[in-house]
Amino acid sequence: MAFLPASEEALVESFGPHLAWEPPGGFAARGKPDRAVKTHCCFCGQQCGVQLLVKDERVVGVEPWEEFPFNGGKLCPKGVKRYLQNNHQDRLLRPMVRTGRGFAPIPWDEALEQVAERIRRIQQRHGRDAVAVLSGASLTNEKAYLMGKFARLAVGTRHIDYNGRLCMVAAGAANKKAFGVDRAANPWADIAATDLVMVLGSNVSECSPITTDYIWRARDRGARLVVVDPRLTPIARTADLYLPVRPGRDVPLMNAILHEVIRLGGVDHGFVAAHTSGFEDVVAAVREYRPEAVEREVGIPAHRIREAAALWVQAPRTMLLHARGIEHHTKGVDNVLSCINLVLASGKIGKPGCGYATITGQGNGQGAREHGQRCNQLPGARDVENPEDRKTVAAAWGVPEETIPGKGATSPEIFELINRGEIRGLVSICFNPMVSLPDTAHTRAALERLEFFTVIDFFLSETARHADIVLAGSLQEEDEGTVTSTEGRVIHIRPAVAPPGEARRDWEIIRDLACRLGAAEHFQFSSTRDIFTELARVSKGATADYSGITWEKIDRQLGVFWPCPSEDHPGTPRLFEGGRFYHADGRARFHAVDYRSPAEDVDEEYPIILTTGRVVSQFLSGNQTRRIGPLVQQYPEPKVEMHPRLAAKLGASDGVRVRVRSRRGSIDLAAHVVATIRPDTVFIPYHWAGKRAANQLTVRAYDPVAGIPEYKAAAVAIEVLA
Amino acid sequence: MIATLFVDASRCIGCRACVEACSECPDHGGQSMIHLDWLERSTTVQTAPTVCMHCEEPSCVAVCPADAIKIDAEGVVLSAAVERCIGCGNCALACPFGVPKIDELAALMRKCDLCYDRTSVGRKPMCATVCPSGALFYGTAEEVADLRRARPAQTFVFGAETVVTRNAAMIPTYASALAVGDGTIERSPAERHLEEALC
């Protein structure tokens, strides 16, 4: 039973979130640092280079790292203040076991033994798949690889998935379908060198702030900017053309733009004939999508849709970028494919200043989806259901092929299976589903139903509060490894300090647990470098080929772009040069996509579209950023953003408390009345837990291919509170 | 060819990286010398960073009864000298840009000194180093002319008073003029496009 072991208030009192404002001892006591460690920010997929200042073996501050080419010293406020997560009063310093009144310290030996014993007991009674493993995309490549191997060879379950399921999978699945590979097609330098940037569903300025600079560098050279978003975000405000799309209507918009591009003669027939297949189906599919035919549905006047097409056709080089805004949908994969169709039809890919990318969300959003911690995947971005891939990995791991379990459930499905009683035990790291999964009530019910739940974490997240045993792990700056940034650039995370107290490095905890589960022979690692060496070797010959990457090469080149198949290979910053794609025939694939409405569309009872997202000062489920004072101060509470016309209809004004209701639950919060959002849509940021969780409202509906939840379109009603 | 700050509010994304970075400067004690404001959040996401513009004839210096604010040889208007400043706040009232802050407890005025400890050794100020949008840029007028389409302005007209500054403000590409203090915010094309949304 995993009900909370104490009241929420008591847990907050002991474990926070409390706010850190200053380095240890205060700013005045900081003094001259002993060293500056060149590493990367622990938060988003931009993975900005940054130097952590260390004094007396404690992280005490930050200094920009101007030599790192991606960001050249630039940082967002999270990157500046991220150091305050270190030395934090909420930091978990030792393993703990739940008691009748909260959590009590327990020796490591006992903690690990209990975890192993409980896992085995459940598996003996209910089968190996009765235990699931959840992992995360903020983990290094080494840890992502280790988690996949841990689940398959030590726990022996097929149920391993990660929180990238809530982030990168729609783009990943679509990229794989279209290109045969899942990675940004271009290095970010190509954004600065283009003639037109088209940004769809990406609040670049708040969610990937450094990308703003690349876009402006292009505009300084005369490039145009088109932004598609239901909200007038800071990057959208200055766009040459802004298309305020109605949430969930990206396919009809993109099909209409392609329809118009075809009419304007913007198709590169030579490229289409030589390097792609399936174009005729797409031409047929977009025939009915005249701008006038779709303008009501997409919420944008036809002449603006035409303008977008004209700008696209006129620009010799284009860069199309998108993020979760078009991906967090039950047709997330279709939305992405509709963008790729436009890029392929005009032949604008695989050239300097010309291409396409999805902007990854989490720190290792790219690498964490390549090394085998997804339910359908083995290391090297191999397919767990492909016999050849299975054989290769089994040989590399030195196990019979049948030892490797088959495809498991996605992370949201794992929670469905817990609620159905099929999964009874859960091991979780780097995942805070109490904040991040849709329909919080359903997530809570699942956690309360578990027979055994263990969490590896550095702070007691809202999810970890439900754990039977909490294993105190490591912060990013307390371990060494590699991460693959949004560009596909593999970079080096350097350790700044050791874990405090009795806390241990995540990988050591996982390795030791694997040994206790009887899989010692497969986990003979004495450092994360050992894990990288194995990971690189296992990836040889796969799409995500890291076999020619070494930590020394990463340091020398300030990053290596995969694929990098041999020691003398410099890496591959730009994919698809010369129109060569990764399908066996070398051709890219078009996919005809038709419009489907959101899983839950508005009706009389719930007439307003809810969309969710991020603010610049918080990161994802907030387990780290809700503990950093200056970041919390910047945006302390979620508010519901609404247009003055909607506010007038509801009788609300700025600052007034309102109740937002959906079929799943309700949330009370202040109205933020701003004319920078569509009048039929409201926005709530999702970083908070409990009564402040936006996901109390969102719908448990998933993309049929990728399994990504529909965070960006749900139906709600709003009333003003007395 | 002197290096100085170029402030382009049109690029500002309101992220407050500059504010947070300024507070990390070794001698700032966790306080920021930058103001970052929403212009009028109810209608626009436009924000603007305000840093000391380092006037040629600074009002703050002119009105200081304690002679606490010095100008260095490079034209940088320094923060108040701790031993002289009496915290009277004249400078805060006189500054046309609203820059100086009074620390009432310490009876001390504090403001941006163009990161003297960094710029004096050839580095960029913290704020311009981290700014992710290039709204704050540190360099020479020649570099700006090479890199940017927007034009720098170092002359500001506040009613009857003309102020010439060392730092420059960039005139946004879509605006016809740099309007100071007339209270109107010119709508960007994107803001007009949202008004056309079909609901």
Image: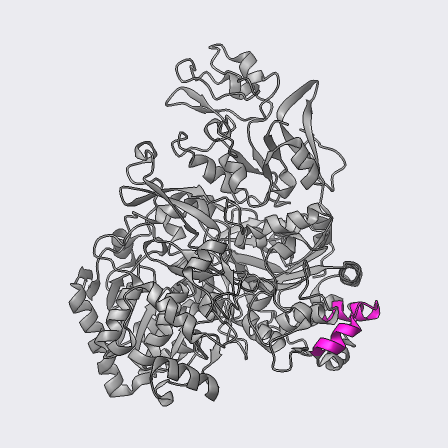
Asked if residue A513 lies in the magenta stretch, the reply is: no
Residue sitting at the far right: A264
x, y percent for residue A145: 39, 71
In the picture provided, is A199 more to the left or to the right than B115?
right
Q: Is the image coloured rainbow, by chain, by secondary structure, or in one colour?
A: one colour
Residue A209 x/y as whole percent: 55, 50
* Viewer-closest of B85 and A8: B85
- The x, y position of residue A105, in whole percent, is 17, 60
Q: Is residue A656 left or right of residue A104?
A: right
Q: How many marks?
A: 0
Describe residue A34's horizontal placement relative to residue A440 as left or right: left
* Residue range (magenta): A255-276
Residue A91 in view (yes/no): yes
Tell me if residue A257 is in the magenta stretch. Answer: yes
Q: Main secondary structure of the magenta part?
A: helix
Q: Quadrant of residue A317?
A: bottom right
Closer to us: B43 or A65: A65
Residue located 53% across and 70% down the image: A710
| Quadrant position of the N terminus of chain A in the picture | bottom left
Residue B160 falls in which quadrant of the image? top right
Where is residue A363, by image quadrant?
Answer: bottom left
Looking at the picture, does residue A194 appear above or below residue A664?
above
